Image (spheres, rainbow, N blue to C red):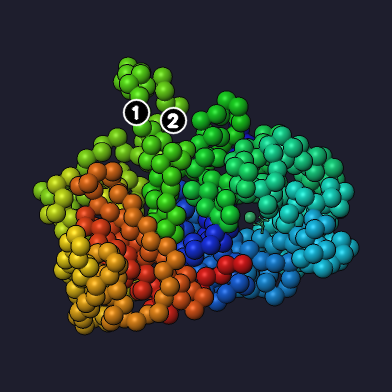
Amino acid sequence: MADKLIIFDTTLRDGEQSPGASMTRDEKLRIARQLERLKVDVIEAGFAASSNGDFEAVHTIANAIKDSTVCSLARANDRDISRAAEALQGAARARIHTFIATSPLHMEKKLRMTPEQVLEQAKQSVRFARNLCADVEFSPEDGYRSDPDFLCRVLETVIAEGATTINVPDTVGYAVPELYGNFIRSLRERVPNSDKAIWSVHCHNDLGMAVANSLAGVKLGGARQVECTINGLGERAGNCSLEEVVMAVKTRRDHFGLEVGIDTKHIVAASRMVSQTTGFVVQPNKAVVGANAFAHASGIHQDGVLKARDTYEIMRAEDVGWSANKIVLGKLSGRNAFKQRLQDLGVALDSEADVNAAFAKFKELADRKSEIFDEDILALVADEAVTHEHEHYGFVSLAQHSETGERPHAVLVFTCGGKEVKGESDGNGPVDASLKAIEAIVRSGAEMVLYSVNAISGSTESQGEVTVRLQNSGRVVNGVGADPDIIVASAKAYLAALNKLQSKADRVAAQG
Ligand code: KIV
Ligand code: ZN
């Protein structure tokens, strides 16, 4: 039987460290549930000691997820590790992931510690963590730029203390595939007790090689765990992308000879969910999950695919969750057909009440738009009103006037704590006027750090999906709104972001 490659997803921890990608506890829980559906082996749910919000998120996920191991990051000190253990209480399967930097640069300039102090701290921390949890992962941060002799001493020591997984990060994305693969192999050969732990790779994408480096770590180095994120989300240029690494190992099983437990038909829904939640749009030509990943534009390719699909396709779109059936439903479709479509798209709503709320929104949309595409349905189920986020503000109606040579004017009616209010303003453009009409009432004082519009299904009949990112008193939140009218979509996105700023349960971004 082939070896198994463990898929460790860190979208909710390393991915969230991406500036602006902060998520609320409810959003993290929704994504964690999708990762469980994907059959991810380990979900790194956060960094419990970094904030009360992250602690809560890890704790909530640890108690909701049953089929994946839930992990919390912790610096190599007793306080962080105790906090991680506390947050993980109640988990069906828990892991503590502790780390300390081992490169000369990080030890001297960042930690201001000698190598001997770092070695001792790594040893004590893993010992402490093992007393609290049977599953302990250790990462030497900036491992790839560490002195190999010193790194071998550290890794031998922590394995002797009971570390069950050794993860070797290329923290700054400096590696190239052959060198990184050989680096992992040489560590495994030189560390005398290396066979007592599972070896893992964790690569950043600064030179665009995170996936290639991770695969080299697996193939050349013998690693059996890959750390990755949905859509490659992460700080700077991001992390190794889950969908790419998984599909590479599956599609080229002839080369890798490894099993992966991922249920790939949930990949597109996971990608869409992460993109909508964080406001990080997926580029159309992104492998596996980009809108064009399976589109054949040239006549020669189209002709080839029609005659025999494997002439130009190495994977099947449906295997990763793209639907072959593009136009799905219309205004006459019933609840059962809608529910079936959700299932085909790999979307599992938490309750019948959620299905009903989504179906009501679907009917509303179908009244205004004759063809409902899969993308419309995915946008609709990501709508916070469907997923019970705290709704202090809710869109009611918009009247807006713009004419060449005149300043646009908007009147916006929305609910505020259950009461209808009306805001009015002019602005540079219709969107500006509409959002100022909201601010005329709310006076949030928030700064807008991102505004982006995306046509959901690529035509003028399509719904516009708007992301608004607001910042206020150190908090960064994303709001998403979808509607065939992009000014309404903008107002909905703005109100969704205000709802998050308003909500006490939501977390302060734990970035840095
Ligand atoms: O990139 C890195 O070094 C990390 C560690 C904390 C594992 O994310
Ligand atoms: Zn990282």
Q: Nearer the viewer, residue 438 or 345?
A: 438
Question: Type of residue at label 2?
Answer: Met
Give residue 383's position: percent from left, percent from top: 31, 61
- Find residue 352 and report its image quarter: bottom left
Ligand 2 near label 2 (Cβ, under 8 Å)? no
- What residue did someone put label 1 on? 297
Question: Which residue is depicted at the point 43% across and 47% down?
Answer: 282
Is 303 placed above or below 34 here?
above
**Pointer 1: residues within 10 angstroms few (<14), some, or many (20+)?**
few
Dot 1 and dot 2 residues touching (CB under 8 Å): no
Location of the N terminus by quadrant is top right
Q: Residue furthest front?
A: 405
Ligand 2 near label 1 (Cβ, under 8 Å)? no
Is 166 placed above or below 393 here?
above
- What residue did someone put label 2 on? 315
**242 lies left or right of 440:** right
Location of the C terminus by quadrant is bottom right
Give residue 468's position: percent from left, percent from top: 38, 64
Give residue 7's position: percent from left, percent from top: 57, 47
Helix, strand or loop at mark 1: loop
Give residue 340's position: percent from left, percent from top: 25, 47
Question: Which residue is depicted at the point 77% across and 50% down?
Answer: 145
Is 370 placed above or below 140 here?
above
Q: CA distance from mark 1 to mark 2?
A: 17 Å
**40 lies left or right of 435:** right
Q: Is residue 72 visible?
A: yes
For marks 1 and 2, the one nearer the N-term is 1
Question: Which residue is depicted at the point 20% across and 79% down?
Answer: 422
**Pointer 2: residues within 10 angstroms few (<14), some, or many (20+)?**
some
Helix, strand or loop at mark 2: loop
Question: Which residue is depicted at the point 81% across and 62% down?
Answer: 107
**134 lies left or right of 307:** right
